[in-house]
Image (cartoon, rainbow, N blue to C red):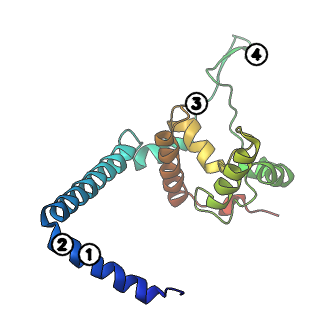
C-alpha cells in the first residue's frame, strides 16, 4: 500500500500526541534541548557576524584607498635623478593613458563577469569550488578583481573562512562606493 503525504503527516501527528501523553517529561526535555540549541546557534551566529565587521576599515579608509604610496624621486644639484626611494614601486597612471586592450585583457583573464556582479561573484565562487573538489586541491580561485583589491589593501593573507567572509563584505562595500563606469571604454 502506497502511503500518501497527508496520511504520513496524520500518522506523525498521532504518534506525537501519544508520546506527549505517555512521556511528558521526555517531550519537555526534548523541547528544552531544542530551544537551548536554537538559542546557542542564534547567539553564536550573531557573535560570528558581529566579529566579521570588527577590524574592517570604515568608509573614510575605503575612500583613501585610491591614495596609494608612490615612489619618492631624489634629484641632484643638476636636476638629474639620483635615486628613488620606495616601499613598492608604483607610478600613477590615468585611466585614459591605459590601453583599452589591456583593460579588456585584464577583465578577460581575472574577472569576466566584472560588470555583472557587485563585488563578489557567487557563480564564479561556486564553479571554482566545484573545480577544486574535482581536482582534490585548489586548482582555481573564485575571487573577483574587487575581492583581490580588498584583500591586498586591507586584509591579511590568511586562508580562513573568517577572512574570506570579511573579503566579501569589503568587496561589496567598495563596489557601493566606486562606479565601474570609467573602466567601460571602447
Q: Are marks 1 and 2 in contact (CB under 8 Å)?
A: yes
Comparing 25 with 94, the one in front is 25
Label 1 sits on residue: 16
Instruction: Name the mark nearer the viewer: 3 or 2.
Output: 2
The Cα atoms of the two marked residues, 4 and 1, are separated by 89 Å
- Residue 80 is labelled as 4
Instruction: Name the mark nearer the viewer: 4 or 1.
Output: 1
Q: Secondary structure at mark 3?
A: loop
The residue lying furthest to the right in this view is 101
Q: Secondary structure at mark 4?
A: loop
The Cα atoms of the two marked residues, 1 and 2, are separated by 6 Å
Q: Residue at x 30, y 48 (%)?
A: 44
The Cα atoms of the two marked residues, 3 and 1, are separated by 68 Å
Q: Secondary structure at mark 2?
A: helix
Label 3 sits on residue: 69
Q: Earlier in the sequence, mark 3 or mark 2?
A: 2
The residue lying furthest to the left in this view is 25
Image x and y of residue 80, in percent: 76, 15
The Cα atoms of the two marked residues, 4 and 3, are separated by 22 Å
User: Up-down: is 6 above or below 102?
Assistant: below
**Image quarter of residue 20:** bottom left
Q: Are marks 4 and 2 in contact (CB under 8 Å)?
A: no
Q: Are marks 3 and 2 in contact (CB under 8 Å)?
A: no
Image x and y of residue 116, in percent: 67, 66
Label 2 sits on residue: 20
Q: In which quadrant will I find the C terminus?
A: bottom right
Q: Earlier in the sequence, mark 4 or mark 1?
A: 1
Q: Earlier in the sequence, mark 3 or mark 1?
A: 1
Q: Residue at x 56, y 34 (%)?
A: 159
**Badge 3, how many Cα within 10 Å: few under 14, some, many 20+?**
some
The Cα atoms of the two marked residues, 3 and 2, are separated by 70 Å
Amino acid at each position: 500500500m502506497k502511503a500518501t503525504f497527508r496520511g504520513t503527516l496524520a500518522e506523525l501527528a498521532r504518534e506525537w500526541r501519544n508520546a506527549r501523553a505517555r512521556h511528558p517529561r521526555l517531550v519537555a526535555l526534548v523541547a528544552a534541548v531544542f530551544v537551548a540549541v536554537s538559542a546557542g546557534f542564534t547567539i553564536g551566529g550573531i557573535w560570528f557576524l558581529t566579529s566579521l565587521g570588527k577590524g574592517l576599515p570604515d568608509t573614510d579608509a575605503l575612500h583613501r584607498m585610491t591614495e596609494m604610496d608612490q615612489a619618492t624621486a631624489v634629484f641632484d644639484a643638476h636636476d638629474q635623478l639620483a635615486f628613488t626611494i620606495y616601499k613598492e614601486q608604483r607610478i600613477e597612471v590615468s585611466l585614459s593613458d591605459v590601453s583599452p586592450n589591456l583593460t579588456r585583457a585584464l577583465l578577460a583573464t581575472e574577472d569576466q563577469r566584472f560588470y555583472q556582479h557587485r563585488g563578489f561573484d557567487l557563480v564564479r565562487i561556486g564553479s571554482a569550488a566545484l573545480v577544486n573538489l574535482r581536482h582534490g586541491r585548489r586548482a582555481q580561485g573564485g575571487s573577483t578583481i574587487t575581492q583581490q583589491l580588498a584583500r591586498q589593501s586591507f586584509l591579511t593573507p590568511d586562508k580562513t573562512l573568517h577572512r574570506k567572509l570579511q573579503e566579501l563584505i569589503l568587496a561589496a562595500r567598495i563596489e557601493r562606493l566606486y562606479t565601474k563606469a570609467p573602466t567601460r571604454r571602447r
